[in-house]
Image (cartoon, rainbow, N blue to C red):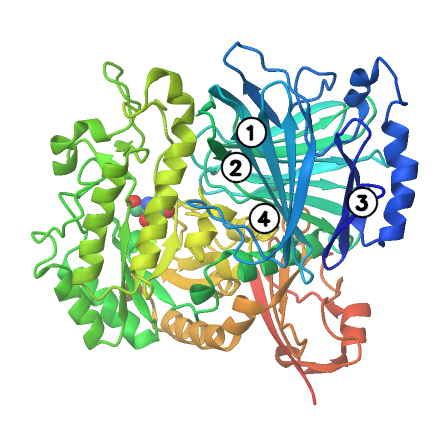
Amino acid sequence: MITYGSRDKIFLLSGKNYSYCMYVNRMGILQHLYWGRKIAAADACFLKAQRGVAAEPSEGDRNADMATGGMPQELGSFGRGDFRSATVVVRRKDGAAMSRFCYVSHKIVKGAVPLAGMPCVRKADETLTITLRDALSDIELDLNYSVSEDSDILVRNMVVRNAGKEAAEVEKAFSFCTELPDTCGTRSALRLAGAWASERKPIVTPIAEGSLRIESLCGYSSHAMNPFLAVLSEDCGEESGECYGFNLLYSGSFAITADVSSEKSIRVQGGVNDCLFGWQLKSGESFVTPQAALCYSAAGLGGMSRAYHDFFRENIIDPKRVYVRRPVVINNWEATYFDFDNEKLCSIIDAAAQLGVDTFVLDDGWFGKRDDDTSGLGDWFVNKKKLKGGLKAVIGHCKEKGLKFGLWFEPEMVSEDSDLYRAHPDWAIGKAGVEPCRGRNQLVLDFTRREVVDYIFETVSKILRENEISYVKWDKNRDITENYTASLPADRQGEFWHRYTLGFYDLAERLTKEFPNVFFEGCAGGGGRFDGGALYYFPQIWTSDDTDGLERTKIQWGTSVCYPVSSMSCHVSACPNHQTQRTTPFATRGAVASLGATGYELDLTKLSEEEKAQVREQIANYKQTDELVLKGDLYRLSDPFCTNYFCEMLVGKDKTRAYVVGERFRGDPCDHDRVLKLRGLDEGKTYTVKELNVTASGAALMGAGLFYPRLPDCGSWIWHIEEVR
Ligand code: DGJ
């Protein structure tokens, strides 16, 4: 619900469990008042009297401008007394960049406000738009806030509009800014940092005076840093205490910053990375920033995660695809790499059919001239020398065996040794006369250019139209360098990164619309583009190239801080693991993979009879629990980063069923017989834990708990829990 009190000029926005409050002060500045547990309109007036007015200069104060430096604000401006980092910087034609944005008007509309060409929240109850204006530059800002009664997520973005007569240059335009007051407690920040094969590991650091900045400069959200930051209060734990989440629904180069002022309030803001950014606005033109999903949780990190999971499933991921039962796939990448022919693929398909797998996904190497990673990208035509009878032969074999067929593409890339590059060398990103940096021997296509996106749309569509393909894996295997496009003049090169991202969204939008029955899986050299923007198009994303039974627990744990388990592709692969060289039990790899959209990524023809029996069992188990993976609530029970165990639990929304998966990492003579308290059950219900033959109340399972099982190194367990009626 959104209310405006015209006497006090207070905006009060309330969602499921939170309220967010701001007011227009005497100077016309939009001051931040409060964000936390739900409060009533009358409380907002008290907050204004106590917090807001205290920060305001008194009437007629000649030095009032300098007071803006200490005010908690909804927007940081530059050069007019606020010395913390700005949310927006616009340079006028005369070179001046100072601004003070003041309230002009507001409106409250039903529903969400769609963003053309960018991922955005698909539904909301109401949206508040507050228009501010800088009198010096005639730049106007629309600050948008969307709320839903049933959600703890507040969606924000900003539109920058040139309402003046002369052109201006936007040098920075973040999506949101908010201020968390000093609570006399130490606060810390949680980020999801990583690397290839080691994505989204939670790192917690103190927040202190000065600036904390997380960012990507790679042209996409990146393996190294997810576009997400959480600010945690001192008492924040897994299921208790306060935390604030900031998640950018954006897949390009981003930045999120937390600045602590001398007044000790924390200004958190973020958006398109302002490094090298510039956007020209002629008179009447606007720049629309991506949306950000802000979350307040009084139920710790777990509460925040569940709020994000519901939000991504209900409001971001395509409703036609989000709850589609995920096919159990066999992907041939780690089974064959580039080295396959019809015979090899058919043998894997045959084995898959006997084991109950649903879909065969043909990975890299089926097109152009592609026997290694030095050639072929961009030539999306089947290599008939390698695949006799083309895709149709493989698809025909799948059909005969009762499997569906999926195909890998890397639409944004080009190899120099390809027909596409020979015909259009200028379509690759780069600057004439500068030797391009190569990554995995490939270059990136210039998706700022419409004709390049059109061409890729046509060639990929042709393959999808002419063949029975139900699943597409969309990969991206290198960072963007050179950051230059010949399609823009010298003074507009600052638009490059964001325009590239818009090109990616354009292709994703067109392909997912054109082929509504195809299921799209995102991927970027593993989980390098796992963000809220990508989830808008890809309901599922390849979580990481690291499928090791131990390391994966950490990657999936970290990913689940924001993203639902249904969005994580989780495969069982061979041992020794190709990335870590570690050997873990087959059952453990299966158990960990069952906490996501499960699949296989190994040569099924090489499995022993015992392993084959396990695959059958794993698939049968998965088909019993996939409803919980798609729709359940996640509770993280045992942290793989700081304990000897990993344990997570999925609970159905009606609390009649739950599914627990755990793993013990190392033998430790003294760590068994410890109590594992379950979570999320109904205290008043009675449940059975099938594997333990235990019947107990929800209160007992959560309050007294169960013992961790005794297991060898990397041993795992699965518990199916059901209500006894
Ligand atoms: C990187 C992906 O993460 C892998 O799963 C595989 O598709 C390769 N690319 C293929 O080149």
Specify which label sits upstream in the sequence, 3 or 2: 3
Task: Say which element carries label 3.
Answer: loop
| Residue position for label 3 | 6
Instruction: Please identify the quadrant where the N terminus is shown.
Output: bottom right
Q: Mark 1 points at which residue?
A: 173
| First reached walking from the N terminus: tag 1 or tag 3 | 3
Cα separation between marks 4 and 2: 27 Å
Of 188 and 670, nearer the camera is: 188
In the picture, measured across the screen, residue 5 lies left or right of residue 608, that is right
Q: Type of residue at label 3?
A: Ser
Distance from disc 1 to disc 2, alpha carbons, whole Å, reads 7 Å
Where residue 558 is drawn, which disc sits there?
Answer: 4
The amino acid marked with disc number 1 is Ala
Residue at 22 percent of width and 31 percent of height: 427
Q: Alpha-carbon distance for marks 1 and 3? A: 29 Å
At x 60%, y 54%, the residue is 665
Query: In the depicted view, which residue is nearer to us: 402 or 260?
Result: 260
Where the C terminus falls, by quadrant?
bottom right
Of the numbered discs 1 and 2, the one sitting upstream in the chain is: 1
Contact, mark 1 vs mark 2 (Cβ under 8 Å): yes
Describe residue 115's horizontal placement relative to residue 685 as left or right. Answer: left
